């Protein structure tokens, strides 16, 4: 009973820690979102991937969902970019992909680790998760928000070719964010695992 209670307390502490980090990253300039013209390079995913690889799919989904909720609320109150109030007010775009990020990454990692080394499994699981999450987010924007107003918010005009707008986002945001997460997260998680192995739920 005491062990179960201790485990619950430890998990709550981890949630509180990651929630606090996400709030700081969201609202302190350049710690989570780096403005690049009309775009915003998001590095908060690094925190979600780290949390998910420490806490497992359920914990990752909860942390990812919390980030999505912040994004959703912020789109109405304090948008991080001109795009946010136009598309991130839809929870299927602002929340769902982030929940999937947190859940999918450790699941893929555990599957891959059976066949590959731990470090390589982390890198590949992050890349695959980023591709799926970005495809879900950008795919919904492409199919449901292909309007001149959204194109204007992106700050580009490709003769009404919204596919080229999405392509620009992939080049300026999705690819750099994926590379950054795939490089940084495994290094962070490896160091944390060495020092706090008992705190990990994914081993």
Image (spheres, grey):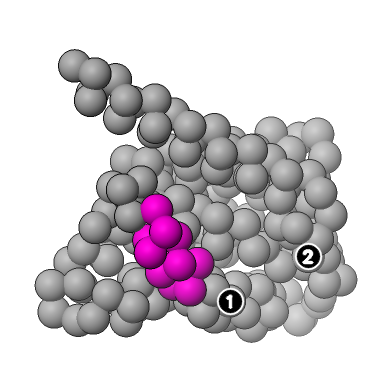
Q: Residues within 10 Å of mark 1 (few under 14, many from 20)?
A: some
Name the outermost residue toward the top: 1
Tell me residue 169's x, y (percent). Answer: 66, 74
Q: What range of the chain is rendered magenta?
A: 186-196
Q: Is residue 81 above or below residue 16?
A: below
Side of 21 where 7 appears, left or right? left
Question: Can residue 40 be seen at all in this image of the molecule?
Answer: yes
Tell me residue 155's x, y (percent). Answer: 84, 70
Q: Which mark is residue 180?
A: 1
Secondary structure of the residue carrying tag 2 is strand
Magenta-highlighted stretch: main secondary structure? helix
Distance CA(mark 2)–CA(mark 1): 13 Å
Q: Point out the tag, 2 or 1, that comes first from the N-terminus.
A: 2
Q: Is residue 140 magenta?
A: no
Q: Badge 2 is on which residue?
A: 34
Secondary structure of the residue carrying tag 1 is helix
Tell me residue 18's x, y (percent). Answer: 55, 43
Question: Can residue 151 be seen at all in this image of the molecule?
Answer: no
Name the outermost residue toward the left: 114
Tell me residue 100's x, y (percent). Answer: 39, 51
Q: Quadrant of the N terminus?
A: top left
Report if the CB atoms under discs 2 and 1 are less than 8 Å apart.
Answer: no
């Amino acid at each position: 009973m005491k062990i179960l209670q201790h485990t619950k307390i430890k998990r709550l502490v981890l949630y509180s820690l990651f929630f606090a980090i996400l709030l700081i990253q969201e609202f302190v300039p350049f710690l989570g979102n780096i403005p690049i013209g009309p775009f915003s390079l998001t590095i908060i995913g690094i925190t979600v991937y780290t949390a998910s690889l420490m806490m497992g799919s359920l914990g990752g989904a909860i942390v990812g969902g919390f980030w999505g909720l912040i994004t959703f609320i912020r789109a109405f109150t304090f948008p991080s970019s001109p795009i946010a109030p136009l598309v991130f007010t839809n929870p299927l775009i602002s929340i769902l992909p982030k929940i999937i990020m947190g859940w999918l990454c450790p699941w893929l990692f555990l599957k891959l680790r059976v066949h590959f080394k731990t470090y390589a499994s982390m890198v590949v699981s992050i890349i695959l998760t980023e591709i799926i999450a970005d495809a879900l987010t950008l795919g919904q924007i492409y199919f449901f928000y292909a309007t001149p107003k959204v194109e204007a918010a992106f700050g580009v005009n490709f003769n009404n070719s919204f596919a080229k707008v999405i392509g620009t986002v992939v080049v300026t945001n999705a690819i750099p964010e994926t590379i950054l997460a795939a490089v940084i997260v495994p290094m962070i998680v490896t160091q944390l695992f060495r020092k706090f192995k008992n705190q990990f739920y994914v081993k």
